Amino acid sequence: MVTLPPGQHVVNGFPRFGTHLQEPAPPVPDEPAIEICGAVSEPFSLPLDALAVLPRRELTADFHCVAGWSTTGLRWEGVAFATFYRDVIEPAIRPGATVTHLVFRGLDGYRSLASIEDALAYDVLIAEHLGGLPLDGDHGAPVRLVAPGHYGFVSCKHLCRIELHTAEPSGVYTTPAPRFLLRPHMRARVWKEERHREVPAWALRLPYRLLIPPIAFLSRRGSRSR
Ligand SMILES: Nc1nc2c(c(=O)[nH]1)N[C@H]1C(S)=C(S)[C@@H](COP(=O)(O)O)O[C@H]1N2
Ligand SMILES: [Mo]
């Protein structure tokens, strides 16, 4: 028996989901890399090959979308984000700068936001594998962020850039949906049901749930494995 966070229900399988809707997954570049910019002395780009020298991390976790669906027991493998931060990012931070927030960007232009403390939680990963296989286009190839304690919108797929900020940036989430419906909560912790910035979670459970079928349908149309 799995205990789910408030307002969530289990779905079969792990759907492709997101604001990309029917867009196909962005092509993986010939030499994929993660660009580090913002509060650094000099922006730089880390080829994904370089992840191979960092300690591997496996994680089995549930995944919760803010719209209300959850998938249980996903087995991820990659590098702990905290390790990546300490080994790769921290040495490059501009002297005197205090990083408070990170903005993650995907190859499809998607952006997500996390406070530094949330990003450094023990279960946040840069994942390369799901269920023992390299990530496919549906779930974020070549690598994605996985932050299981937060709603799925934080877990940026197709991760290609990390921006370091010294204050909370505004306007990170841009979506095709009406802005009012999607003003995601800054921390988005699933166990605290932090779905939205202003609107209480109980008022959103039903409207968000109604969005699942059309979004799942459109996302499937953009999927290669449909
Ligand atoms: N690059 C990118 N990352 C994204 C999204 C997206 O549209 N593009 N959607 C987010 C949302 S709302 C959810 S619920 C999860 C869905 O992940 P999945 O498609 O692997 O199920 O990805 C998140 N990360
Ligand atoms: Mo989501």
Image: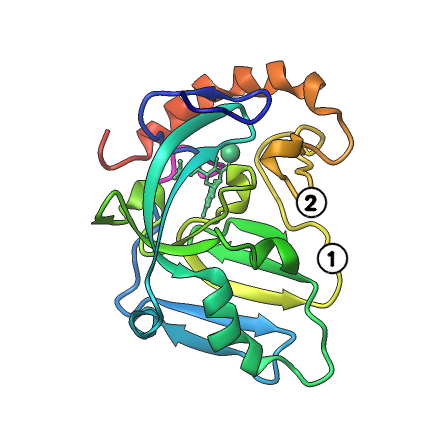
Quarter of the image with the C terminus is top left
Compared to 210, does 224 lie above or below?
A: below
- Label 1: how many Cα within 10 Å (few below 14, some 14–19, many 20+): some
Q: Position of residue 98 (x, y in %)?
A: 72, 73
Q: Circle 2 is placed at which residue position?
A: 186
Instruction: Label 1: state its secondary structure.
Output: loop
Quadrant location of residue 154?
A: top right
Q: Position of residue 223 (x, y in %)?
A: 29, 35
Query: In this rendering, would 144 be left or right of 112?
Result: left
Instruction: Label 2: state its secondary structure.
Output: loop
In the foreground, 30 or 54:
54
Please give the name of the residue rendered at 55% of the width and 37% of the height, measured from the top-left corner.
151
Q: Circle 1 is placed at which residue position?
A: 168
Residue 115 in view in this figure: no
What is the span of residues highlighted in magenta in the rendered image? 18-23
| Disc 2: residue Cβ within 8 A of ligand 1's nearest atom | no
Q: Position of residue 61 (x, y in %)?
A: 41, 40
As shown in the figure, which amino acid type bears the numbered disc 1? Glu
As shown in the figure, which amino acid type bears the numbered disc 2? Met
Estimate the spatial distance between the alpha carbons at disc 1 and disc 2, rounded to whole Å: 9 Å
Q: Position of residue 121 (x, y in %)?
A: 56, 55
The earlier-in-sequence mark between 1 and 2 is: 1
Compared to 197, does 165 lie above or below?
A: below
Please give the name of the residue rendered at 62% of the width and 68% of the height, measured from the top-left corner.
164
For residue 141, the mark is: none
| Disc 1: residue Cβ within 8 A of ligand 1's nearest atom | no
Q: Main secondary structure of the magenta part?
A: loop
Quarter of the image with the N terminus is top left
Compared to 56, does 19 lie above or below?
A: above
Residues under numbered marks 1 and 2 in contact, where contact means CB atoms less than 8 Å apart: yes
Quadrant location of residue 116?
A: bottom right
